[in-house]
Amino acid sequence: MSNTIAERVENIKTELQGGNAFGERVTLVAATKMQTAEAINEAIQAGVDAVAENKPQEFRDKNEFLLPCSRHFIGHLQTNKIKYLIGKISLYHSCDREELANELARQSLAKGLVSDILIQINIGDEATKGGYAYAEAKETFARLTKKDGLRVKGFMAMLPDSDDETLLRALTKKMRELYDWAKTQSSEVEYLSMGMSGDYRLCIEEGSNMIRLGSTIFGARDYGGN
């Protein structure tokens, strides 16, 4: 299995060598939901840039067994679970609402920390997904960049599950335009996290510089619960 994960990571890294359409380096984040510490460590050794959980308890249970590597959080985060993550996460991808931003800022300040966040945008305006509306994005960015305890590093978005490539490219272009605008507002902005196993190539072509890959690295997920 180790060779399989290593080979997959190596193949992806080779694919990413040219950067995105804007010539920017693409950060490779391994989405580690339901993966064992052993499998995650194989991905770390193979050279992923960061590992990311989407459940706080899973992070808590696995974190001490993982090799040194940047730790990200990519899931919906309840405010009462921040305590498992605070001070241990390098980047929160899913700052999707005011309640979370306020509580993350409060707990960061209480510990003398600044937490790096991405503002999650619901780019497809989907009822099933969290995130700020695209129409609110600039106002939200301006507000959160002023909040003590937080450092806004960019944006995160999840594309709709659609075969309409024209639609998907239009949405990714809107996110890239938003990211480019934000870069003119703050020198802290450096990430547009957009693209998962099914759509990362399209996202890179449209300017994403951070991708979150699970099954492309680890293979199909086993939901057997063993």
Image (tube, grey):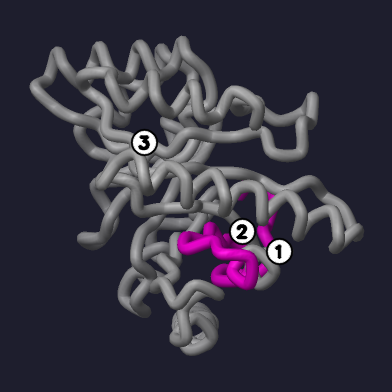
Q: Measured along the vertical axis of the image, is residue 201 above or below residue 129?
A: below
Q: In the rendered image, which residue does mark 3 sit on?
A: 117
| Residue under the image location 34 percent in, 69 percent down | 44
On residue 88, the disc is none
- Residue 168 position in % (x across, y down): 79, 56
Q: Measured along the vertical axis of the image, is residue 43 above or below residue 37?
A: below
- Residue 9 position in % (x across, y down): 48, 79
Amino acid type of disc 1? Asp
Distance in Å between CA atoms under marks 1 and 3: 23 Å
Tell me whether the residue at label 3 lies in contact with that at label 2, contact meaning CB atoms closer than 8 angstroms: no
First along the sequence among labels 1 and 3: 3
In this view, the residue in front, 184 or 170, is 184
Secondary structure under tag 3 reads: strand
| Residue under the image location 51 percent in, 55 percent down | 31
Q: Residue furthest right?
A: 164
Amino acid type of disc 3? Ile
| Residue under the image location 39 percent in, 73 percent down | 25
Secondary structure under tag 1 reads: loop
Distance in Å between CA atoms under marks 3 and 2: 17 Å
Q: Is residue 124 left or right of residue 106?
A: right
Which quadrant would residue 80 be assigned to in this image? top left
Residue numbers of the magenta segment: 204-226
First along the sequence among labels 3 and 2: 3
Q: Measured along the vertical axis of the image, is residue 146 above or below residue 48?
A: above
Circle 2 crowding by C-alpha within 10 Å: few under 14, some 14–19, many from 20: many
Tell me whether the residue at label 1 lies in contact with that at label 2, contact meaning CB atoms closer than 8 angstroms: yes
Secondary structure under tag 2 reads: loop
Amino acid type of disc 2? Gly
Tell me if residue 168 can be seen. Answer: yes
Q: In the rendered image, which residue does mark 1 sit on?
A: 199
Inspect the magenta stretch and tell me whether residue 224 lies in it.
Answer: yes
